[in-house]
Image: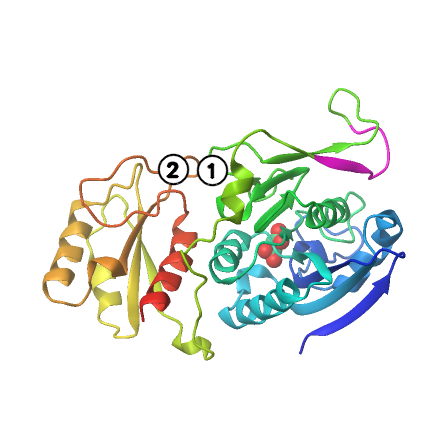
Amino acid sequence: MVVSSMHSIGALDCTVRVLGTGGTIAGTAHAGAPENAYKAGQVAVEDLLKPLLPGLRGRIGQVQALQVAQVDSRNMEHAVWQRLAAELQAGLDDPTVLGQVVTHGTDTLEETAVFLQGVLRGSKPVVLTAAMRPATSAQADGPRNLLQALHLAVDPAAQGVWLAFGRQAWPAIQVRKVHPFALEAFCGGDGPPAAQWVCAGEQDGTPVGGNSGAWRWSESDLRAQAARPLAAEPVSLPADVERWPRVEIVHSHAGADGRLLQLILTDPTVQGVVISATGNGSVHDRLQDTLRAALSQGRLKCHQILVASRCTRGWVVGEPDHGWPVASRLTPAQARVALMLQLAAVA
Ligand code: SIN
């Protein structure tokens, strides 16, 4: 069940919805506990929001808080994605809603981003945000990330699905988590952020007071990319999440012999395979042999294979000579979601 509450801030006739899913941003730690000893997904999204409401006066009329889930995002489930997408779509279809924010764990945020970009219809802002420190930390980064996400959600320049995190904003499908504990935990592949949060009273790049500020957009075409859906048409998935196409990921690595892939392909419920490839989309010869055998035996078709580079930064350029489809800019985890959606679209 989705718990919801409405907060009126001022006379403005516009609503922003904030959908909580859990994560470190809603995490709590015992006093004196080591930095990494906390439990994610404990604080209600409404309580994360309340202290920020006075700072939104004059920008937003009402804020609606919805608790969609309360999970550590390592345990993100397709059923939660389904609920989240349904709530976000309701907000996208509601003319009184200007934009929406999703609080999320950092660990699988890049996957949720691809999912939302692929299934939502409409172009109003949907801004994901997160934190690296729990809500109880004296130096919590969540409140400022959430505030900045709220500002992005009412920025008419932001269309589609975004990440606002650490004073930077990217089209969300471009982001990947690249650090397990640094505050700058995300990067946008190789690209710069599309917008930077500039604090009021900033001097030489250092904020000198309060949380007030504004998003400053870069000159790049990143804004246009955010508004472009992953699929040509938003994908409709079966109501029963058990019927969503099952896609597994296999790594290409030193000594890969194809046996894991063979084993996976003995499972008739597996409909697609992502190869987490080396470098510029290259795949170990023995894995290639296994894939070719699966194709010639009719176990797989070409469109059920997707290759993504396991490199942390950058993207695959050109076409690797194995000839299989490549998700050039997606991480293997994101490619799994993209292939799932592609397979659902052709089912
Ligand atoms: C999570 O992904 O829910 C835990 C880690 C985090 O949010 O940083």
Q: Residues within 10 Å of mark 2 (few under 14, many from 20)?
A: many
Q: CA distance from mark 1 to mark 2?
A: 7 Å
Q: Nearer the viewer, residue 229 or 65?
A: 229
Instruction: Residue 146: give x, y in percent of width and height.
Output: 73, 50
Q: Is residue 209 magenta?
A: yes
Location of the C terminus (image quadrant): bottom left
Q: Which residue is mark 1?
A: 189
Give the magenta range.
207-215
Q: Residues within 10 Å of mark 1 (few under 14, many from 20)?
A: many
Location of the N terminus (image quadrant): bottom right
Q: Which residue is mark 2?
A: 315
Q: Secondary structure under badge 1?
A: loop
Instruction: Residue 286: give x, y in percent of width and height.
Output: 16, 50
Instruction: Residue 127: give x, y in percent of width and height.
Output: 64, 51
Q: Main secondary structure of the magenta part?
A: loop
Question: Going from the N terminus, do you reach mark 1 or mark 2 first?
Answer: 1
Q: Residue at x 27, y 35 (%)?
A: 318
Q: Residue at x 79, y 36 (%)?
A: 213
Q: Is residue 339 magenta?
A: no
Q: Residue at x 54, y 65 (%)?
A: 75
Q: Is residue 285 above or below residue 77?
A: above
Q: Are marks 1 and 2 in contact (CB under 8 Å)?
A: yes
Q: Is mark 2 within 8 Å of ligand 1?
A: no
Number of numbered tags placed on the structure image = 2
Circle 1: residue type: Gly
Circle 2: residue type: Trp
